[in-house]
Image (tube, rainbow, N blue to C red):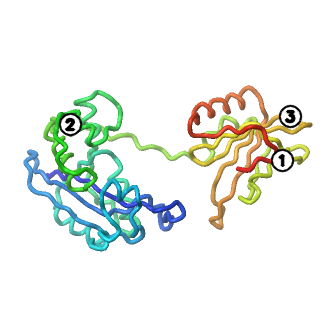
Amino acid sequence: MNYIVLDLEWNQPTSRNKLITDPIKLYGEIIQIGAVSFDSDFNRLGDISITVAPKYYTEMNHYVRALTGIRTRDLKKGKPFPEALREFKEWCGADCCFITWGPDDMSVLNANMKLHSIDSSDLPRCYNLQLIFNKQITGENRQWSLASAMEKLDMPLDLACHDALNDAIYTARICSALDMDKGIAEYVEPPTKEKKAPGSRYHRLKPHLITAKEISSERKDSMRCPHCDLPLVTSRRLRMRNRDKVFLASCPDHGSFLIILMRKRNAESNHVYEENIYTINEQTEGFFNKMSLKCSGRCSAKAPRANSKL
């Protein structure tokens, strides 16, 4: 069996409203494939570099361009992804497995294959070298950048980073500093993260729920008391990382409430909010304070204002 040390570079949309969502949410479209091959004894056999012409993200994201040095006009020199993938698979051969630095490359590769309706079930097994590196070198459970790992091993950074072939070469050099036979023999697949259902983080609040309803995005600023339907006055607001909104609000006659607006798409693929209003008590107030601490530095806490807009 041969080992293929694989690295990919991918472009991203230039703005949020240009994100491809059909047939999948495409967060990265592959623009470079770089790899180094080894035999079963980790003797180097060769390398390959393929430039890929993207189908959707044909304009370079400015951040990706700054990292990679790849310009928009360079993308036109590449091969369509299906052709590039066929060339890469032929180069790999039938009996091989992949080694990558981190889990992202395989995730992006699978997404791009799905985008082009290519079956990914026959992809070789992949070993995340970061896990072997951590077990043998650092003893830590963290994600090291490729450059940081090279520096940790006192290896020279003599090639430009964020080039697919160069990063594959760096990853191969790290392999040479590790006991790969032991690392692969003892390798344990990382657990698959279960995708949480929408609103699952709030399931403990369910006993305190007063009312839940769907509101259109045009009305998401018109929160009203569930008892008298008067506008609520917001006292604090949190903007969550998942784009949910969490409020403390009050009615002059019926007291305070915890309000959570969960952003989602309806059957017509329009953005709407599900408004959930909870009684304020020790549990719900504790939840808000906990979320406030987690959001410290990236969420906003607003001064009291009636009918505050999101």
Tell whether 160 sits left or right of 272. left
Q: Is residue 81 visible?
A: no
Tell whether 43 sits left or right of 132. left
Q: Earlier in the sequence, mark 3 or mark 1?
A: 1
Q: Quadrant of residue 189?
A: top left
* Residue 43 % position (x, y): 7, 48
Q: Is residue 94 visible?
A: yes
Which residue is label 1 attached to? 224
Give the secondary structure at mark 2: helix
* Residue 259 % position (x, y): 74, 42
Q: Residues within 10 Å of mark 2 (few under 14, many from 20)?
A: some
* Residue 139 % position (x, y): 29, 27
Amino acid at circle 2? Gly
Give the secondary structure at mark 3: strand
Tell whether 166 sits left or right of 210. left
Which residue is label 2 attached to? 183
Q: In the image, what residue occupies the spot 34% across and 47% down?
A: 103
Q: Earlier in the sequence, mark 3 or mark 2?
A: 2
* Residue 293 % position (x, y): 60, 30
Which residue is label 3 attached to? 255
Amino acid at circle 3? Gly
Between the residue at mark 3 and the residue at mark 2, the CA separation in whole angstroms equals 60 Å
Q: Earlier in the sequence, mark 2 or mark 1?
A: 2
Q: Quadrant of residue 108?
A: bottom left
Q: Nearer the viewer, mark 3 or mark 2?
A: 3
Q: Which mark is residue 133?
A: none
Amino acid at circle 1? Arg
Q: Residues within 10 Å of mark 1 (few under 14, many from 20)?
A: some
The reply to whether callout 2 and callout 1 are in contact (CB within 8 Å) is no
Give the secondary structure at mark 1: loop
Q: In the image, what residue occupies the spot 73% across and 49% down?
A: 275
Between the residue at mark 3 and the residue at mark 1, the CA separation in whole angstroms equals 12 Å
